[in-house]
Structures are given as structure tokens and as C-alpha cells.
Image: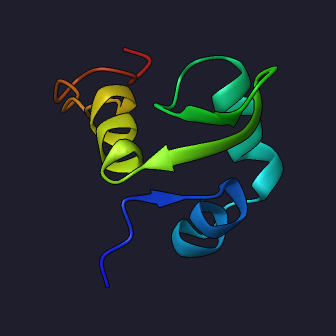
Amino acid sequence: MTKFLETPKELAERVGIPVTNVRYLIREDMLDHIFTAPGKRNPKIPKGAWEKYVAQFTVKAEPKAANAGRGS
């Protein structure tokens, strides 16, 4: 059976971060989610939301110039 929604705890266990970090991302509207109870309670994360978050907030490494950072 395919799961379309997961709890913050399930997401945290799947990706290896603390559940408090997942809840923070939800609270700050940085991670796609829906509430399944009135009053903004019982958040669920839809399939693909974590991957979208990672793609959106990944900082791309840029190669440094050959002489950059050398005190000459």
C-alpha cells in the first residue's frame, strides 16, 4: 500500500532528523503540509514534500578561484 501522507515523526525517522526540526519547518511554512484536524492540528506531510524542500533550499557549491584566499 502506498502512503500519500506521513506524520512529522514518520518523516523525521525516514530522513534522519529530529521531529522538532520537522515541526519547525511546518510552523514556518517551509515544508508543504496539510492539517487533518480543525485549529491547525495534526499536520501531515504529502508525498514528495521533503524532496521538494531539499531541492528548493539546497545551496549550490561554487568553485573558488585558484588564488582566492591566499594572502598575497
Where is residue 49, by image quadrant? top left
- Picture coordinates of residue 10 (x, y %)? 63, 69
Residue 43 position in % (x across, y down): 67, 40
Q: Quadrant of residue 39?
A: top right
Instruction: Say whether residue 41 is left or right of residue 13.
Output: right
Place of residue 17 in the rendered image (x, y in percent of width and height, measured from the top left) = 67, 61
Q: 12 or 39, which is in the foreground?
A: 39
Coloring basis for residues: rainbow
Q: In this rendering, is residue 25 above or below 45?
A: above
Q: Position of residue 65 (x, y in %)?
A: 17, 24
User: Residue lying furthest front in this view?
Assistant: 38
State whether residue 29 is above or below residue 47. above
Camera-nearest residue between 56 and 23: 23
Residue at 53% x, 23% y is: 30
- The extreme bottom residue here reads 1
Q: Which quadrant is home to the N terminus?
A: bottom left
In this picture, residue 68 sits left or right of residue 8: left
